[in-house]
C-alpha cells in the first residue's frame, strides 16, 4: 500500500502542475526566441530573457526531483524520463536549452496516450509546430555567424526546417557547422516520428469512424430483419385465427328447428305417428 500511496501522490502532483508548467513552457519559448529574433535589442532585454530561462529551468528541475521523490520505482522513473534528466543535468550547454522545453512538453503531453484520437492528434500537431519553430531558432542561432553559413535570416531557417522535417531536402539551405548538422539529424528524426504519429492517428480516426458506421448499419439491418420476422409471424397468426372463425360458421349454417336436408337422391322419411 505505501507504493500505491506514492504513485497516487505522483499522479496528483503531475495533474496539478500540468497547466502551470505549460504556461512556463510558453514563457521559456518567448525568452528563448527574443534574443535570437532580435539580437540588437537592449542589453536589459537579453538579461531579462536569460534570467527567465534560468528561473524556468529551476522550476523544471524542482518538478523533476519532486516527481522522482514521489515515484515508487526511482530507477524506472529515471530510465523512462531521459529527456527530463538531460534537461536538468545539462543547463550550461546552450543548444540543449531546447531539451528543457521539450521535456516540459513531454510532461504535459504524457496524458495524451489515454486521450481520444482527435486529442492525441492535437497534442502531436502542437509538438510538430513547436519543433518546427524552435528547430528554426536553434539552427539560426548556430548558423547565422558561421563563415560559410547560408542560413542568415529567420525565413531561411523556417524554410530549412520545413524541408528538413518533411525529408524533402531541396539543398538550397543547409547547415555547415557540426552542431548545426546535429540539430538537422535530430530535426529529421523527430519530424519523421511526429508526422508519422499524426498520419497514423488520422487514419485510425477514419477507421474508427467507418467501423462505427458499419456497426450502425448492421444494427439497422438486424432491426429490419427482426421486424420482417415479426410481420411474418403476425400474418401467420391472423391466417390461423381466420381459419378457426370460418370452420364454426360452416357447421352452424342451418336455422334452429329445421332438419338438415339429405343429400340429393335420398328421400328423408318422415317419422311414423
Image: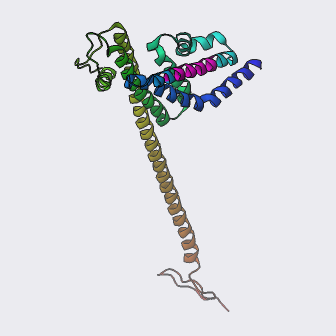
Q: Quadrant of residue 162?
A: top left
13 relative to 197 in the view: left or right = right
Which residue appears at 25% of the width and 16% of the height?
Answer: 150
Q: Position of residue 179 (x, y in %)?
A: 37, 9
Q: Quadrant of residue 21?
A: top right
Q: Position of residue 67 (x, y in %)?
A: 65, 19
* Residue 79 visible in the snapshot: yes
Q: Looking at the image, how many numbered discs can be counted on the residues?
A: 0
- Among all residues in the image, which is located at the extreme right? 1
Q: Which residues are magenta?
A: 49-64
Q: Which of the pair 253/46 is nearer the observer?
A: 46
| Main SS category, magenta section | helix
Image position of 236 with respect to 103: above or below:
below
Image position of 12 with respect to 219: above or below:
above
* Residue 111 visible in the snapshot: no
- Is residue 132 shown in magenta? no
Which residue appears at 59% of the width and 74% of the height?
Answer: 248
Image position of 91 with respect to 194: above or below:
above
Q: Position of residue 94 (x, y in %)?
A: 46, 13
Which residue appears at 69% of the width and 18% of the height?
Answer: 70
Point out the image quarter for the C terminus: bottom right
Q: Tell me how the rendering is colored.
A: rainbow
Point out the image quarter for the N terminus: top right
Amino acid at each position: 500500500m505505501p507504493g500505491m500511496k506514492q504513485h497516487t501522490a505522483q499522479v496528483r502532483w503531475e495533474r496539478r502542475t500540468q497547466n502551470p508548467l505549460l504556461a512556463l513552457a510558453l514563457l521559456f519559448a518567448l525568452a528563448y526566441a527574443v534574443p535570437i529574433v532580435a539580437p540588437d535589442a537592449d542589453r536589459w532585454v537579453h538579461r531579462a530573457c536569460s534570467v527567465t530561462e534560468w528561473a524556468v529551468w529551476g522550476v523544471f528541475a524542482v518538478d523533476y526531483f519532486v516527481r522522482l521523490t514521489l515515484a515508487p520505482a526511482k530507477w524506472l522513473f529515471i530510465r523512462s524520463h531521459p529527456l527530463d534528466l538531460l534537461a536538468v543535468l545539462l543547463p550550461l550547454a546552450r543548444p540543449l536549452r531546447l531539451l528543457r522545453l521539450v521535456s516540459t512538453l513531454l510532461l504535459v503531453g504524457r496524458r495524451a496516450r489515454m486521450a481520444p484520437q482527435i486529442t492525441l492528434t492535437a497534442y502531436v500537431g502542437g509538438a510538430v509546430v513547436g519543433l518546427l519553430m524552435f528547430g528554426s531558432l536553434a539552427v539560426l542561432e548556430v548558423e547565422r555567424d558561421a563563415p560559410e553559413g547560408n542560413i542568415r535570416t529567420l525565413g531561411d531557417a523556417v524554410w530549412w526546417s520545413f524541408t528538413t522535417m518533411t525529408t524533402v531536402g531541396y539543398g538550397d539551405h543547409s547547415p555547415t557547422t557540426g552542431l548545426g548538422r546535429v540539430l538537422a539529424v535530430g530535426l529529421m528524426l523527430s519530424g519523421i516520428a511526429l508526422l508519422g504519429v499524426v498520419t497514423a492517428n488520422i487514419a485510425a480516426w477514419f477507421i474508427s469512424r467507418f467501423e462505427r458506421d458499419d456497426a450502425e448499419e448492421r444494427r439497422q439491418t438486424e432491426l429490419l430483419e427482426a421486424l420482417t420476422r415479426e410481420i411474418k409471424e403476425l400474418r401467420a397468426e391472423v391466417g390461423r385465427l381466420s381459419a378457426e372463425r370460418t370452420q364454426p360458421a360452416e357447421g352452424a349454417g342451418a336455422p334452429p328447428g329445421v332438419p338438415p336436408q339429405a343429400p340429393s337422391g335420398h328421400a328423408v322419411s318422415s317419422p311414423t305417428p
